[in-house]
Amino acid sequence: MSTLDIATSPVVPARHWINSQWTESAKIGQSINPSTGEVVGHYQDGGTDEAAAAITAASAAFAAGEWARDVNLRARAISQIADGVEARSHELAAMTSQENGMLLWQTMFQVATAVQWLRYNAAACLISSDVGRHADIGSDVHFRSSPEPLGVAAIIAPWNGPITLTARALGPALAAGCTAVVKMPAQTALTNNLFAEIVAQCSAVPTGVVNIFTESGSQGAELMVSSPEVAVISYTGSTAVGRKIVEASATTLKRLNLELGGKTPLILLDDADLDAAIPTVVSAATMSNGQFCVTGSRVLVHREIADDVRTRLSAALAAVQPGPSDDPASQIGPLIDKASAERLDRLVDAASSMRCHWSAAD
């Protein structure tokens, strides 16, 4: 089935993959193409029930012991997931581009990166020693440590990198011997379903080891954070939510891996070659439609060249061609949703009220 077929055919709404079974929810959501505002599909919208079922399945799979003990099994399973992602890389990239508005070449790069990370972690299973560290620290004292998997790892993935940032967290968790509960974003629900299909087709992945559900709200994620059955949380998103995760997980002393909202300043000194620097600044600022953690968010410029940079940068940004994510001529795609566009308008209005100089393209 082609990408177009998947996007437009009246198929069953995208489902969750929990305990190695396809599951549904009481609530159905719509996947919107931000380039056109059109509905491209529907999805089962999960929550507390789906999170609870996924945690139970992952906990049981970990307790069974085979996954945590068998490094060869883990290497085969992760390699199969990598093979599946690679085999359907164009399909995944095209669907991601359609759902989150990023240009196709950018989503292709993300998917390719996901494959590399998964293969790295598959290899890590085989080269990592279970002996750990040891040393004689005294005449009668011998020290030894052995690494052990923590248990259930909960992964909360963002919409701006649903495949690559899921793989970045899932690969190491599986390689370490953990089982996983993955809450994927509603904005890329059809992409999530494709990834779940890949996992479902991997014969080396035991029942309940990888559980994937899509949620538009936060109730399921909140249960993942508070559940005593979850040992570690990986979250990529805003600083505000990150603080809430720290607070909510304190009672169970979870291990946390948080990549939170940050800024990526670009610095131009007075000896900069502006003919080379300005195009680089524009590429950095418009990458992933300005909606990614490594997107250039501000330019710090030496006072001596500030006016020249402002003039050049304004002209260069005005020449950037906006358009739909699937148009090869587009140099920047849409914001993810109406709320994000309205937020940007408010920022522009606030800057104008402070008499800031700003430029905007039609």
Image: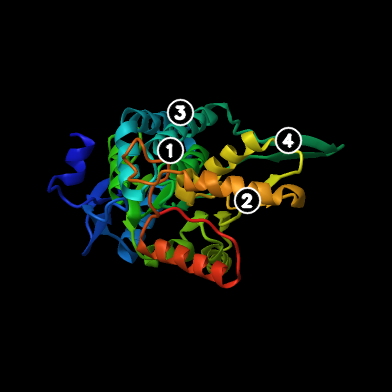
Q: Which amino acid does label 3 sit on?
A: Asn
Which residue is more in the foreground, 175 or 66?
A: 175
What residue appears at the point 76 percent right and 49 percent down from the top-left corner? 304
Q: Do the residues under discs 4 and 1 have CB atoms within 8 angstroms?
A: no
Q: Name the residue under label 2.
A: 310
Label 2 vs label 3: CA separation? 56 Å
| Quarter assignment of residue 104 | top left
What residue appears at the point 29 percent right and 35 percent down from the top-left corner? 91
What residue appears at the point 43 percent right and 49 percent down from the top-left corner? 160
Q: Mark 4 points at which residue?
A: 134
The crowd level at tag 1 (other Cα within 10 Å; few <14, some 14-19, many 20+) is: some
Q: Name the residue under label 1.
A: 106
Q: Which is more N-terminal, label 3 or label 2?
A: 3
Give the side of residue 176 with respect to residue 200, left or right. right
Which of the image's four quarters has the C terminus?
Answer: bottom left
Q: Residue 72 carries which label?
A: 3
Return the x and y of residue 165 as percentages of the image width and height: 47, 45
